[in-house]
Image (cartoon, rainbow, N blue to C red):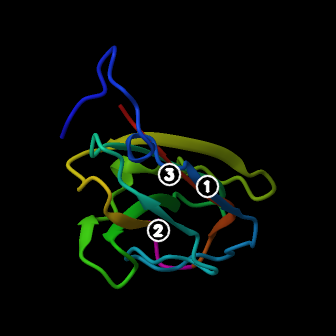
């Protein structure tokens, strides 16, 4: 993938549109212990820039609604073309945000994380979406009040 060095003539494909989506539909009593997209799905379609690199940011407002050590995480998953395409980035908590396992029944904590995704095919369309998972004891104590995702071209 070519780098955009000083003096490079920048063309439209070099810096495609930044895309963003936020949803504030509560996902209460999260119980899934495998990665799920949540309701509604929060995802964006983007075009890979000439560099083949994008910055992906995910954020969430989350809490543990009980006196236990349950945690909830929100992260990102990326596919080629659309959600039915080839997965190019599997969801992992290391690319997302997670609660700390401390009971906070009335308080949400909003946090975000940005990571770099490389080796994309320039000009190819991709689909990135938020994924969520619960860690901890049996039960349904974590809540999510907001999820958002931002994808922007990287040099």
- Residue found 41% across the figure and 58% down from its top: 47
Tell me if residue 80 is in the magenta stretch: no
Q: Position of residue 43 (x, y in %)?
A: 54, 69
- Which element carries disc 2, helix, strand or loop? strand
Residue 138 on image: x %, y %? 47, 78
Disc 3 on helix, strand or loop?
Answer: strand
Which range is magenta? 130-139
Badge nearest the viewer, 2 or 1: 1
Q: Are marks 2 and 1 in contact (CB under 8 Å)?
A: no
> Mark 2 or mark 3, which is nearer the start of the sequence?
3
Residue position for label 1: 20
Label whose residue precedes the other's in the sequence (2 or 1)? 1
Q: Is residue 68 above or below residue 82?
A: above
Few, some or many C-alpha atoms within 10 Å of disc 2 (few <14, some 14-19, many ≥20)?
many
Q: CA distance from mark 3 to mark 1?
A: 20 Å
Residue sitting at x 37%, y 77%: 34
Can I make out residue 64 in this image? no
Q: Which mark is residue 98?
A: 3
Report how many numbered discs are placed on residues in the image: 3
Q: From the viewer's perspective, is 58 left or right of 145? A: left
Q: CA distance from mark 2 to mark 1?
A: 15 Å
Q: Is the residue marked by circle 3 packed among few (<14), some (14-19), or many (20+) residues within 10 Å?
A: many
- Please identify, in this view, whether the residue under mark 3 or under mark 2 is nearer the observer: 2
The disc at residue 129 is: none
Q: Which residue is mark 2?
A: 131
Camera-side residue of 148 and 54: 54
Residue at the extreme top: 6
**Front one among 101 and 132:** 132
Image x and y of residue 4, in percent:
31, 27
Of the image marks 3 and 1, the number of the one nearer the N terminus: 1
Identified at 52% across, 57% down, the residue is: 69
């Amino acid at each position: 993938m070519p780098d955009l060095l000083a003096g490079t003539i920048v063309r439209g494909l070099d810096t495609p549109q930044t895309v963003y989506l936020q949803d504030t539909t509560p996902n209460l009593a999260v119980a899934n212990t495998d990665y799920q997209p949540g309701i509604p799905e929060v995802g964006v379609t983007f075009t890979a820039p000439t560099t083949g690199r994008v910055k992906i940011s995910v954020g969430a407002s989350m809490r543990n609604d009980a006196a236990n050590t349950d945690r909830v995480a929100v992260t990102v998953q990326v596919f080629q073309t659309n959600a039915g395409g080839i997965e190019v980035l599997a969801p992992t908590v290391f690319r997302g945000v997670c609660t700390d396992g401390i009971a906070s029944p009335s308080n949400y904590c909003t946090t975000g994380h940005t990571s770099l995704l490389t080796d994309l095919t320039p000009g190819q369309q991709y689909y990135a979406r938020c994924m969520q998972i619960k860690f901890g004891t049996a039960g349904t104590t974590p809540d999510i009040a907001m999820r958002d995702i931002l994808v922007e071209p990287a040099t």
